[in-house]
Amino acid sequence: MADLSEILRLLEAERDRYVLEAADLERRLSFIRNQIHALEALIPKYVLEEKINHTYKRLPESSIQVLLEDRTHSVEQEELETLDQELETESEFEHKTNPSLSTPQSTSIPNTELTTSTQEEPDISDIPKLSVPRKPGTLPLLREFQEYSIQNAILILMRRRPDLHFHIDAIVRDLYGNKLTPEQFKTAKTNVGKMLSTGVQAGLWYRVLHAHGVYTLKHEKGVTSKLLKPLRKK
């Protein structure tokens, strides 16, 4: 019996590892798709530049000078904006592929403010905003979530990626950002953990079975906690 228990424990641990790896792969796949769309958006600009350069070769020197003066400012501005976007994307990729950067012992994991520019924003019109201001000194959420309670902010986050399994640490980073001190991270994780448990009891989302601190929006038979039955009216 002792051997069977040990085998069962090892199997469950291995399964949990794959659940977390699958979630990480989904994040990386989303990043890769965004990169593809970004590159596809850049290519036409360089095609246009190539055509213009080809045109310059056939123009008199005086005409080339006039065209260059007209385009200098706009081209420089476009290059600066593109560089900013590339730097932000590279930073997100480094943080997503190296979770240790966001743990309390280190300095950050992308603000996985999962920028889903290629995905449609979910309808959150039914999610109410705060009716009263937060107490002074409360750890602030990221700007996009500041008008919502922690529980409703989690719901918004999950609606954006309804098929994803969210680990509590990733949720903390997505809601509060990557610049928390170890003490702030601990406080944020405690608050988020309470709201996750409350949300499970309310049927807002589900806990992934046999995986510690992992939740998802959709019920999956045999994968998540039981689907709650609606209360009968007396």
Image (cartoon, helix red, strand yellow):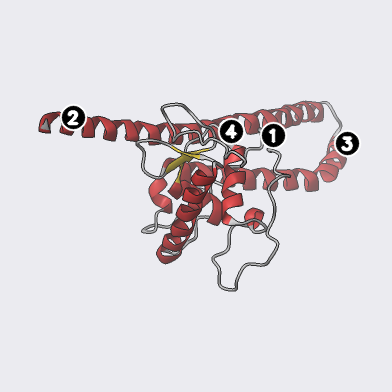
- Name the residue at 41% across, 61% down: 186
Which element carries disc 3, helix, strand or loop? helix
Label 1 to label 3, Cα distance in Å?
45 Å
Q: Disc 4 to disc 2, how far (Cα)?
A: 42 Å
Amino acid type at mark 4: Gln
Expressed as whole percent of the image width and height from the top left, the position of residue 190 reads 44, 58
Q: Residue at x 68, y 66 (%)?
A: 132
User: Taking 155 as reference, is 30 above or below it?
Assistant: above
Secondary structure beneath label 2: helix
Residue identifier under label 1: 120
Residue 230 image offset from top left, x and y in percent: 57, 37
Disc 3, disc 2: CB below 8 Å?
Answer: no
Give the residue displayed 88% in from the left and 36% down from the top: 63
Please tell me which residue is depicted at 79% across the width and 30% down the height of the picture. Answer: 52
Please name the amino acid that badge 3 sits on.
Ser
The residues bearing labels 4 and 3 have C-alpha atoms spaced at a distance of: 37 Å
Q: Circle 2 sits on which residue?
A: 7
Can the viewer see residue 109? Answer: no
Q: Quadrant of the C terminus?
A: top right
Evaluate if marks 4 and 3 touch, with contact meaning CB atoms under 8 Å apart.
Answer: no
**Mark 4 or 2 closer to N-term?**
2
**Closer to the N terminus: mark 3 or mark 2?**
2
Inter-mark Cα distance, 1 to 2? 44 Å
The residue that disc 3 covers is 63
**Regarding mark 1 in the picture, which secondary structure is present there?**
loop
Quadrant of the frame with the N terminus: top left
Farthest-out residue, left: 2
Q: Which residue is mark 4?
A: 35
Q: Quadrant of residue 133?
A: bottom right
